[in-house]
Image (cartoon, rainbow, N blue to C red):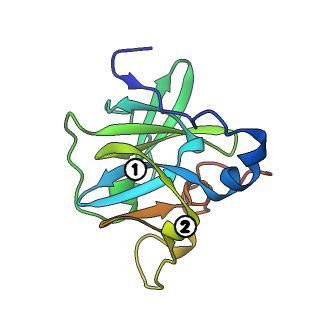
Amino acid sequence: MSPHTITAPRAPTAPSPADAGAVATSLREFLAFKLGAEEYGIDILRVQEIRSYEEPTRLASAPAFIKGVVNLRGVIVPIVDMRLKFDLAQPSYDSFTVVIVLNIGHRVVGMVADGVSDVITLAPEQLRPVPEFRSALDSDHLLAIGSVGERLLILVDIERLMTGPEMGLVEPSLQ
């Protein structure tokens, strides 16, 4: 593992078999990441690793939000800049910028974020419905709004987003 790689934490040890049914189905873990001033969350089980940002090799005719590709241990990985995808302010790349490497639809995809903060476990009562509105991020790609005290997390269905036809990255999985 390189000094610039952080492996995402995995779920803690499972509860005893007597408790496993209720606990396992009710709690979900999300990796919290920042884009501008907002905080988003994605299913931790989709995260392979978190890497420091390195300039990708640009591909001709790729949409602006596809920054290019990088070679990750012999695998060519497309890199999506989420600030560009979500029509946020022009991204700036600094020492906090990271690439979240995801396993989506039997393919590896990198997602640029302004930084990651932590892994958050949410219970069903901490999830709020997403209000309907027009935005750059289709509400079909949003799971819920996670609420932890005063902190709000926009929970993204990252598999649905990355396998959407406008992305053109991966085929929807057959799961």
Labels 2 and 1 touching (C-beta < 8 A): no
Q: Is residue 17 above or below residue 147?
A: above
Provide the secondary structure element on which disc 1 rests: strand
Vertical order, 54 against 175 (above or below): above
5 in relation to 127, above or below: above
Q: Of the residues shown, which amino acid type is indicated by label 2?
A: His
State the residue position of label 1. Answer: 32
The answer to whether 126 is drawn above or below residue 10 in the figure is below
* Location of mark 2 (residue): 141
Q: Quadrant of residue 102?
A: top right
The x and y percentages for residue 5 are: 39, 23
Relative side of 38 to 158, left or right: left
80 and 45: which is toward the camera: 45
Amino acid type, label 1:
Ala
Q: Is residue 20 visible?
A: no
Q: CA distance from mark 2 to mark 1?
A: 16 Å
Tell me the crowding category of disc 2: few under 14, some 14 to 19, or many 20 or more residues within 10 angstroms, Cα based.
some
Q: Which of 35/154 is in front?
A: 154
Q: Nearer the viewer, mark 2 or mark 1?
A: 1
